[in-house]
Image (spheres, rainbow, N blue to C red):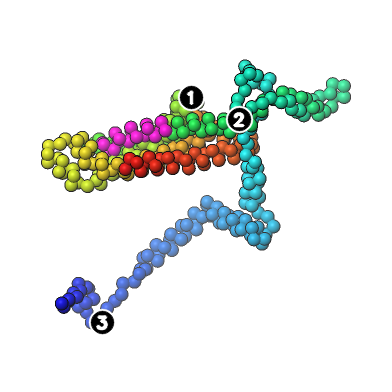
Amino acid sequence: MNRHLTATPTKNSHRPPSEWRLTPIYSVRTLLAILVLIILLSLSAQRTDIDRMLAMCGDAIGVMFGWQETSQVSKGLGRIATDLFPLQLSEVRETARIEHFNYDQLALLAFIETRTFVENTLNVETLQMEEVEIPREVLVEPIGYFLHVIKLMLQTIEIALWGTLLAILLAVILAFFGARNYSPSPALYHLARSASSLLRAIPELISALFLVLAFGFGPIAGVLALGLHTAGFLGKFFAEDIENADRGPQDALRSTGANRLKVLRHAVLPQVLPSYLGYVQYILERNIRTATVIGIVGAGGIGQELKGRFEMFNFGHVATILLVIFATVIALEYITGRARNRFI
């Protein structure tokens, strides 16, 4: 069987080979644009200390290979590596400072012992400061601080969970009115899209500052800050998936007389549900990470404890907090991934 190959005529096919011209990969305009971009990046690098960063990283690499004796970066990283370990798991408190302390109701693995503390006191005879050893009764909890961090982490997870639920509720409304093919009117469409953009534009930390002033210190401000900000993201993603859904099942269902909500439920939702679950999974993980930060401004969770320990240079405590946060994020990613696979 003979097969004939046909070629589509091009601009050069009607000309002799001597008149053919190859289109250059890079035109003069492209080269000028690249040159201008390089100049702008160079100016920006000076304003943002990129050149200094590269120089400091080069010094650190030189210390690693023995080319230099010391560098600021290597000193800082070395101090962090030294001060973060060992982890601080225990907690020691004086029994006299514990309100309503009951000797018969000690925490898990806790015990009481007497320790000697050295304090500087004024000698009334010599009027000189002297070191004096004072025995005091203390309550030792070998895993007391670790349990305290776990408790704060659970509160952080609860803040992130409620913030995510609030974001989903708001996003469903924004998505319905923000989808061009389902919004009742153009005015509501633009209003929903503008609201989503506004919520995304305000960082959680900024909104948490104002919400703390309105609701006071505590988890309420954290829940609202996370929910409002992430609702802007979910509202945009949900609406765009609705707009991009396959029109075939929708048109078929409309031909049977189904209204807008039934078409959305039976023809659109099954298509976009896997993407929605992926968005929610990411937002939940993100909210847990962010909830550890907004606690710094008093919005509840583990962030306030992290800030306080860091300011007091208790890096052993900081290492314990960071380890718990890391383990929580990894565990949550595994759990949400398994749950998503079961739903899809």
**Residue 333 image point, x, y percent:** 44, 42
Residue 19: image quadrant is bottom left
Q: Is residue 24 above or below residue 324?
A: below
> Is residue 297 in view?
no
| Marks 1 and 2, the one that precedes in the sequence | 2
| Marks 3 and 1, the one that precedes in the sequence | 3
Q: CA distance from mark 2 to mark 3?
A: 85 Å
Q: Which mark is residue 17?
A: 3
Magenta residues? 161-178
Q: Which residue is mark 2?
A: 144
Q: Amino acid type of disc 1?
A: Gly
Q: Nearer the viewer, mark 1 or mark 2?
A: 2
Q: Is residue 143 above or below residue 245?
A: above
Asked if labels 1 and 3 touch by Cβ distance under 8 angstroms, the answer is no
Q: Which residue is mark 1?
A: 216
Label 2 sits on a secondary structure element that is helix
Residue 189: image quadrant is top left
Which quadrant does the C terminus fall into? top left
The majority secondary structure of the magenta stretch comes to helix
Report if residue 128 lies within the magenta region: no
Q: Residue at x 64, y 42 (%)?
A: 85
Q: Is residue 109 above or below residue 239?
A: above
Q: Residue at x 84, y 27 (%)?
A: 128
